[in-house]
Image: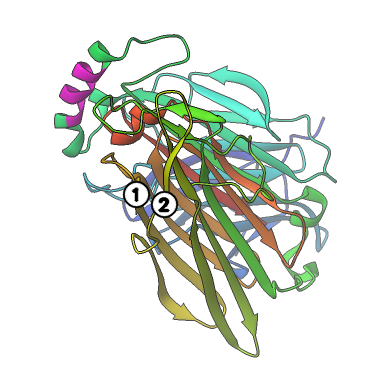
Amino acid sequence: MEDLFEIQRMTHSLGELFFAWTDSGEYYRVYKNKQQVYEGTAAKLTDGELDTRQPFQYTIERVDGGQVKDVIVIQTSALTEVKEDEHPLQRLVITVIVASSQIALSWERIKGVETFDIYRDGKFLQTVEDNRFIDREMDVSDSVTYSVTATRPLIDSNRKLNVSKSIAATLFEAVIPSSTNNKPTEEIYTFTVRVNRRDQLLRPVTDHKKAKEVARWKFRYATFLKEDIIKNPNFMSPFPYFTGDDRNFDVQSERFRTRVDMQGEFTAGKSSLTYTKATGPTIGLNYVKRYKRHDHASVDDIVIERLDAKPTDIRFTISHDVGNPLTASPPIHYEVTGRLDQEGNIDLVGYHNISPHHEIYLSLDDQEWQTVHLAESEGLAYLSGVPGNNYWRYMTCD
């Protein structure tokens, strides 16, 4: 029986990457971002020229009789030293290995995380202790989205900020009782990878048809309160209750606390980024839950910037700190950094408080909205960020 053509070993080190594959061909070609970097009979490669700014992709071709018989695609990134104040998932090495026999995920260990929950297309598959997962059950004609989620005790965070936060979280836990659905001193981590269908991805480089370029994309980030009426955790406030948005996750809903809409376009060798910012009405109620006053929070504390303007590449950041316009309270805080290019490559990373509900969606060329990230609220008392944040990342392998 012929050995499966798969990656056998892979090693990341600072400034260098090594991988070896099944030695079952006459010779091999290796391409990096579609540029040939190797041709020979050795079934291994060491790459010392690594770009630390973004993920990159290798294509390995097994050649017999002058024809490409099989292909492996690897998407990964360079190992770097993470700064203490950096987003935990920003530089986390996430590797996707796509072969005709499997799709394999591996990721750099996160200090303090003991288990990872694996989801395929939103459905739970299993919990693993190792930092890897192999799927041999998907059809080659299907695209698939994997999500890996984990939690970490706040005290295990390597960020200086969390040394003080862990002390505050202990006090917070004493005030607000824990339950099975309430984890006030844990940080949440989720990274999601959408993998293109293998019958398109695993083609010889010379046979790759030029992908249809993305003409435009839309991005939506909304925060909302699921409840119809919600109790104010600040008992000193003159507004003991507020109205909520009375809904669940819904990309089309016009009820929200805040919403950011962005649109990127690639036309005639140029790119552009436009956006709108909006806040929903904050309605304060009295002790018998009747209307007392309303107002709109300012959008000035939603700051959007475009980075490194390029004709085929759009990068942006969002910094969001919107408070309650009627009473003193911690603001809804989130941050996002994004990169989308004309070939449809996507890399989005961000974090937010675990209150209120957060929903993020993306659409390419006016197609249906894709879900990027959904997070349920633990309650208004968690706006402070003391109990920990929700860290997320979304990327593609095309």
Q: Which residues are magenta?
A: 165-172
Q: Measure the C-alpha gap from mark 2 to mark 1.
A: 6 Å
Residue 390, located in which quarter of the rendered image?
top left
Residue topped by disc 1: 325
Give the amino acid at mark 2. Asp
Q: How many numbered discs sit on the rendered protein?
A: 2
Determine if residue 108 is in view.
yes
Q: Nearer the viewer, residue 305 or 253?
A: 253
x, y percent for residue 254: 63, 51
Residue occupying the point 69% across, 51% down? 252
Cβ atoms under marks 2 and 1 closer than 8 Å: yes
Residue occupying the point 52% across, 29% down? 229
Q: Nearer the viewer, residue 363 or 224?
A: 224
Q: Nearer the viewer, residue 126 or 209?
A: 126
Q: What SS does tag 2 mark?
A: strand
Residue occupying the point 40% across, 76% down? 308
Q: Nearer the viewer, residue 190 or 171?
A: 171
Residue 66, located in which quarter of the rendered image?
bottom right
Give the amino acid at mark 1. Pro
Q: What SS does tag 1 mark?
A: loop
As drawn, is 227 to the left or to the right of 152? right
For mark 1, does the 10 Å Cα neighbourhood hold few (<14), some (14 to 19), or many (20 or more) residues?
Answer: some
Residue occupying the point 48% across, 18% down? 129
Residue topped by disc 2: 295
Q: Earlier in the sequence, mark 2 or mark 1?
A: 2
